[in-house]
Amino acid sequence: MIKRTDSSPVTMFMGASTKQGYDIASKSRKIVKSLIDHKTRHLSPEERAIVERIVHSTADPEYADITKMSSNFVDESLKAIRNGQDILTDITMVKVGINQYPGDVKCYINHDETLALAKEEGITRAAAAMKVAAAEGFDGVVVIGNSPTALLEVLELVQNGDMDVKSVIGVPVGFVGAAESKEALHNTEIPHLITQGPKGGTPVAVAAVNSLINLKS
Amino acid sequence: MIKRTDSSPVTMFMGASTKQGYDIASKSRKIVKSLIDHKTRHLSPEERAIVERIVHSTADPEYADITKMSSNFVDESLKAIRNGQDILTDITMVKVGINQYPGDVKCYINHDETLALAKEEGITRAAAAMKVAAAEGFDGVVVIGNSPTALLEVLELVQNGDMDVKSVIGVPVGFVGAAESKEALHNTEIPHLITQGPKGGTPVAVAAVNSLINLKS
């Protein structure tokens, strides 16, 4: 549901809102292009914009190699975002990074219900948060920037018909389970973006979704 | 100033608070150690713990090569953190990642005064936020996870005697100015932690400060 249309106090370009900030972002964009242009020629303009923003945000050109999107990811995500559907994040840091979305950005990791469920089932809080969101009737774009267990939980909920998602940005980070959870998402029919291997994280998740929000207009 | 001593609802280990989360963090710690142990042997136990947490959070062993601390960084930071002195961050994402500190974590980037100052002086909001903090009498640990201009502003304020800092975690990210701003910090007498080159960012900043908070007890 779109609640506010005037939530942005300032016009932003890759996170910048002042002249100096804009100049830096603009220079950075040129450097990023020069570093990864040869790796992104096979992508659509929208997909290129997303990969460029991820590399801009991480200063790590390797993301041009490991970022993979399903062919329907951009269209399905943009449709959901243009409709103002909810965005669900695994952790608070990802939520606060999505600061230009007129719709709702939800995160249940610190909710009492989530803490109780995590304890009861012996699962992570991030995974429990996905169950809580599903039970509340979530339907929109899921953004997992940190937790492999949250991503695996989403896949199970969707497979069992217990959760509706329009697309999933699945970029959990870490040496334990992250790569496997992303591979599992990559093997589904869900419209998705992943980063192959252990790398990923909050800045990657935020860059991907903010790029989509920027592309919607 | 320490305001609350009971702010942590749960005991955390590398960000984990449930059994499954703890198991993952514990396995990850072993993998991180096996990947970077040979690179961290010259460090003190506290410095190693910080570097390991950064690599755990980013899944990027390169941080073991590029993370540099001044010899007084750990002692001065721990002293400030044990005293409950304020922590100042450049952006909100870094602030919300520091979720286990009993003292104050401040961030002025969205304050009206900051927006006005940025516009007036044609500087970034993150840099203006440092000036606002200095004017309010900040004295504590500065954590810059995103903005090179904020880091350069801190150096100028300290040099001019307009700001008191106990230590600076300076890990801004990006291809424009980030490496130079960190090199500038590295060349000062300020107790500091940096990541050499363009890489850095929110997860690195949060890992470093949360590791210190963990070490304080």
Image (cartoon, coloured by chain):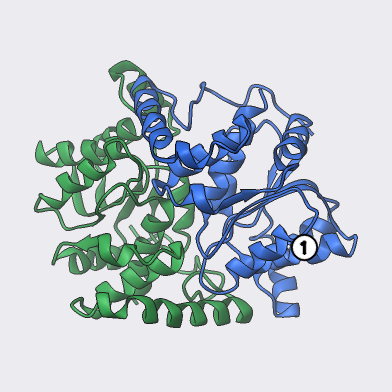
Chain colours: A green, B blue
Spot the residue most to the top.
Answer: A120
Name the residue located 62 percent from the left edge and 26 percent from the top edge: B7
Location of the N terminus of chain B by quadrant is top right
Residue B73's quadrant in the figure?
A: top right
Residue tagged 1: B155
Count of numbered tags: 1
Q: Nearer the viewer, residue A187 or B7?
A: A187
Question: Is residue B145 something one can see in this rendering?
Answer: yes
Spot the residue most to the right.
Answer: B161
B165 sits left or right of A192 in the view: right
Secondary-structure class at tag 1:
helix
Question: What percent of the width, then of the height, locates residue A148?
Answer: 29, 39
Question: What percent of the width, then of the height, locates residue A76?
Answer: 19, 64
Question: What percent of the width, then of the height, locates residue A105?
Answer: 39, 52
Name the residue located 39 percent from the left edge and 37 percent from the top edge: A108
Q: Nearer the viewer, residue A13 or B33?
A: B33
B216 sits left or right of A60 in the view: right
Position of residue B54 relative to residue B128, above or below, is above
Residue B115's quadrant in the figure?
A: bottom right
Name the residue located 61 percent from the left edge and 41 percent from the top edge: B209
Label 1: few (<14), some (14–19) or many (≥20) C-alpha neighbours in 10 Å = many
Question: What percent of the width, then of the height, locates residue A161?
Answer: 10, 39
Name the residue located 63 percent from the left edge and 66 percent from the top edge: B148
Position of residue B66 relative to residue A21, above or below, is above
Q: Nearer the viewer, residue A44 or A198?
A: A198
A91 sits left or right of B7 in the view: left
Chain letter, disc 1 residue: B
Q: Amino acid at mark 1?
A: Leu
Location of the C terminus of chain B by quadrant is top right
Question: Is residue B99 something one can see in this rendering?
Answer: no
